[in-house]
Amino acid sequence: ITMRSASVLAGLLRSAAASDVHTDSDILFGFMPDWPRWTIRLLMIMGAALAVVLIGTNVLYTPEDEKDLQVTEGRATRTKAATKKLHAEFDSFRRQYIAVYLVIMLADWMQGTHMYTLYLSYGVNISALFLTGFLSGAIFAPFLGSAVDKFGRKKSCIVYCILEIIINFLEHYTNFQLLLLGRVLGGISTNLLFSAFESWMTTEHRHRGFPDAWLARTYSAASIGNGTMAILAGVIAQVLEDKLGHIGPFQGAIALTVLALVLVTRWEENYGEEHAGDHSKSSLYHQFTEGWRATLTNSHIWRIGMTQSLSEGAMYTFVFMWVPTLLSMEPEGGVPTGTIFSGLMMAVTIGGLLFQPFESFVSKYFVSEANASELSASLIYALAAASMAVPAYCLSTASSTGHCFENILASFMVIEMCVGLFMPVAGTLRSKYVPDALQGGILNIFRLPLNAVVVAGTHATDVLEPAQVFVGVSACFLAAALLQATLISGTAAIDANK
């Protein structure tokens, strides 16, 4: 169905670009910005699709845990009143976490969209700065996660906010050494961003006695919010840049990070420990060695790590490729990257909205609920592999056609929808297989193979033809799908947190 929808999207884009005949639609386009018509049509299609999915998922789908207020867990059955109370507590907890998550992601997106242009205006060595940030992240990743578990997830989130405020202040200076320091700190903060917040949420979720099945709702909301924040960030950052210059988005990010810092201070603290008080007895070295031991000896953990490294590494390689690929095709009217980015982020949001209904469908018709996330992830990665095979095929010399641009653009929307789908399913699987006591450390260990895939993908964009790079991206997603499939079994997987 999804690939058929992509074909329909390609057809609509094709019809938008194919004719210059004046119709009644000219009146509509007359009120639009002076962008190529195919980009306006793309935004209209994606906006309509997002509206349909948003309404459809709210009207036609009800989460399984809300269908019947009589909840049974093991031998204990809750009354309707107790279950309503638990739902209210969970909704309050989820809002508490999502509020912080949305603020920090909005601040992060605002920096990312304008960092290149800021450094370009400073006339500094941009590649050296980006490489420094990457190397910093790679060096600190193996150790930082253990510190998160040892010293506390809330404290680590506070440290992240403080680091981000310092980094964005350093961006005000044209001094290369200060910018370099900012990139070193940026590598540390990136590791904290992708470990401390999620570790706090999953552990706190269990501490408060919420069912593990409800974690998917939080991950889905985070995926939807991430796409929405990305769309919003492009608009806000552009307004700030128009008003305050290239540094404007970074000043806005400081204000948002201060807000996040205030919100985080209201959280309860939790640690990487099996029993209350364990964190005060264990050393940082113990946390570090236990994280590596668990990763290397538990096949479920390392397979999850490799699967997500392959898929996320392929995703980052796609991020490097989409702009130069579209520009190289020279479509009529050029490529307004901002509008394309908005369309891609709408696709991410659509994926986040579809995740829970899709996983429910899988558990209802294909496998047991215990294995629904594993099969869902495998199918999502397979769809991502198929979508990236489209540009690989279209860009090859022998198969280039007149409709190549529309087909490739449609495939880019599909891959971003897959991103919106696999973000929550990946989080669900991490919470299922990675022990709470070691979560911060193991999540950062996962970033080592991820960094290796990103380096290989980035290098490939410099030495290989675009078609060959997309073949590699498709192959990574396919490998992730196959490896993920090995976790599907007839019985429920052992929960590392029980």
Image (tube, helix red, strand yellow):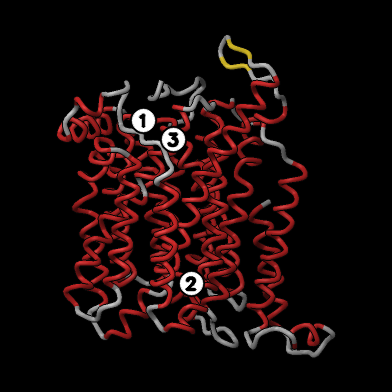
Q: How far across and down, in percent of the image, does residue 303 sit?
A: 36, 36
Pointer 1 or 2: first along the chain? 2
Nearest to N terminus: mark 1 or mark 3: 3
**Residue depicted at 50% across the width and 35% down the height:** 374
Q: Residue at x 57, y 75 (%)?
A: 339
Q: Is residue 123 left or right of residue 61?
A: left
Marked residue nearer the N-terminal end (3 or 2): 3
Q: Is 432 in front, or is 104?
A: 104
Residue 355: quadrant of the picture: top right
In the rendered view, tell whether residue 287 sits above or below residue 453.
above
Secondary structure of the residue carrying numbered label 2: loop
At label 1, the amino acid type is Asp
Please report contact status of discs 1 and 3: CB closer than 8 Å, yes or no. Answer: yes
Query: What residue do we see at 52% from left, 85% from top?
Result: 330
Mark 1 surroundings: few (<14), some (14-19) or many (≥20) residues within 10 A: many
Which residue is the site of mark 2?
A: 395
User: Could you say whether the residue bearing mark 1 is in a helix, strand or loop?
Assistant: helix
Q: Amino acid at mark 3?
A: Thr
On residue 118, the disc is: none
Q: Quadrant of the C terminus?
A: top left
- Residue at image mark 1: 436
In-front residue for pair 448/51 = 51
Q: How many numbered dots are placed on residues in this image?
A: 3
Q: Position of residue 144 (x, y in %)?
A: 23, 45
The residue to which callout 3 is attached is: 202
Residue type, numbered disc 2: Leu
Q: Residue furthest right?
A: 24
